[in-house]
Each structure stands twice: as structure tokens, then as C-alpha cells.
Amino acid sequence: MDIPESVQHQINQFQQLQQQAQAVTVQKQSVDIQLKETETALEELKKTAADAEVFKTAGNLLIKVDRDETLEDLEDKMETLKLRQQTMSRQEERVMKKLEEMQASIQRALGGA
């Protein structure tokens, strides 16, 4: 059975959208991991005394940093990551919905052919 050119075009678009969906999912997973790591670091830092020495990694080095500034930086990073996570979730939902719509359209076109 020959597939009409318009349906073949839809299939190509569907495949591109699948790749986009996969990329969005990978990006979202990366943000989720960063968020979890930042949450853990923030929880641990909050457990330390106000006058405790705090260090952070910079490549192969450990650098002494101000605890309160680091606490503030981590809280800012958490806020940014949560917003990014929400954005990625919405983007993932939109792409998945579009995939479902395209799949149904292709199936209708192939069923009617």
C-alpha cells in the first residue's frame, strides 16, 4: 500500500515531534536532578551552625565560602529551578498532547486510505 504524500509528511512531522518530546523529557529529568541536589545541599547547610566553616567545590578545588551568602544563593537557585521545572512540565504536557493528536490524525488518514 502506498502512503499518500500528505500522510507521509504528517509522519515525518510526528517523528520530529517525538524527538522533541524526548529532548524535553531529558531536560526535565536534568532539572529534577539539579533540584533534588540543591534541596539536599540546602537542608544540610541549614543544619550547620551560623559560624561553621563552609566550602564549595570549584573543579578540583574546595573553596571556603560565607555560609549565609551560600544559603541565600542556594535558596535563589531552588526558586529558579522550581520555575524551570514548572516550565518544562508544561512544555512536556503540550508536546505529549500534540503527539497524541498527530497520532490520531495519522491513524484516521491511514484508516481512510
Image (spheres, grey):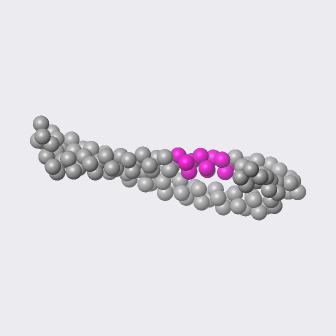
- How many callouts does the rendering have? 0
Specify whether 9 is left or right of 34.
left
Seen as rendered, the residue at the extreme top is: 1
Indicate the position of residue 101 as horizontal and vertical percent values: 28, 48
Q: Is residue 71 left or right of residue 3?
A: right
Residue 63 picture quarter? bottom right
- Give the residue drawn at x 67%, y 49%: 39
- Seen in the image, is 27 located left or right of residue 21? right
- In the rendered image, residue 82 lying in the magenta stretch gets the answer no
What residue lies at 27% left-to-right and 44% top-to-bottom? 103
* Quadrant containing the N terminus in the rendered view: top left
Q: Position of residue 49 (x, y in %)?
A: 86, 52
Magenta span contains residue 30: yes
In-image side of 100 versus 37 (left or right): left
Give coordinates of residue 112: x percent, y percent: 12, 42
Query: Is residue 96 at least partly visible in the picture?
Result: no
Residue 62 seen in render: yes
51 or 15, which lies in front? 15
Q: Going by the picture, which residue comes out furthest to the right?
A: 51
Q: In front here: 7 or 58?
A: 58
Specify the segment rendered in magenta. Answer: 29-39
Quadrant occupied by the C terminus: top left
Across and down, in percent, residue 72 comes to 73, 61
The secondary structure that dominates the magenta segment is helix
Which residue is drawn at the image coordinates 46% and 47% (left, top)? 25
Residue in the image at 79% along x and 52% along y: 62
